Amino acid sequence: MQRMMLLMLFLGLGLLTGCSQGNDPVTVEARELSTDEVSAYFARQGLELHSVEVRPENVFQRELNGRKPLVFLLDEQELVIYQFATAGEREAGWADFEQHTATADLVPYKAYQEQSLLVFYIHDEGVVGQELYRRVEKVIPGLLELKESGA
């Protein structure tokens, strides 16, 4: 009888520990791409980026939800890339941006949000600016893959 009780106790503890381990979320810090990696990836797609210094006084370049952006020029148009650890953090970054710019009269821009990336493309409203944005849009999914692959 005691053996049976001990066996049931061990099985119960084993089930509890096994179940609790399976429910714990694994937190993995997402890898951030470097300026050079982003530039090289865009270059392979036929888009030449030039890295520029971050200007925190610029509403598109300030820290959002604790993340600082990478800032580039693409054919004299600004491309600002924020890399967050998760989509939830990216959404919080977007909310932060909206809160700080709610009453601002902003220059023309497009925002692209996918998974953990928030990208601002500050452009002229002409045909060239629109075409470049379409090309940038096509590159971003591959940039996400690069970020996730660690390669």
Image: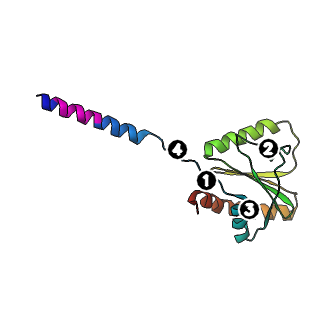
Say which residue appears at 81% left-offset and 50% top-offset: 54
Label 1's element?
Answer: loop
CA separation, marks 3 and 1?
21 Å
Disc number lying in front (3 or 1) = 1
In this rendering, position of residue 72 left or right of residue 143: right
Amino acid type at mark 2? Arg
Say which residue appears at 74% left-offset and 46% top-offset: 68
As for residue 6 lying within the magenta part, the answer is yes
Amino acid type at mark 3? Val
Location of the C terminus by quadrant is bottom right
Amino acid type at mark 1? Arg
Amino acid type at mark 4? Thr
Query: Which sits earlier in the primary sequence, circle 2 or circle 3?
Result: 2
Specify start and end residues of the magenta stretch as a single range.
5-13
Nearer to us in this view, 90 or 12: 12
Query: Which sits earlier in the primary sequence, circle 2 or circle 1?
Result: 1
Query: Which sits earlier in the primary sequence, circle 3 or circle 1?
Result: 1
CA separation, marks 4 and 2?
26 Å
Q: Which residue is mark 1?
A: 31
In this rendering, position of residue 21 left or right of residue 116: left
Using a 10 Å C-alpha cutoff, classify the residue at mark 1 as few (fewer than 14 neighbours), some (14 to 19) or many (20 or more).
some
Using a 10 Å C-alpha cutoff, classify the residue at mark 2 as few (fewer than 14 neighbours), some (14 to 19) or many (20 or more).
some
Identify whether 122 is placed above or below 47: above
Label 2's element?
Answer: loop
Q: Which residue is mark 3?
A: 136
Q: Which residue is mark 2?
A: 62
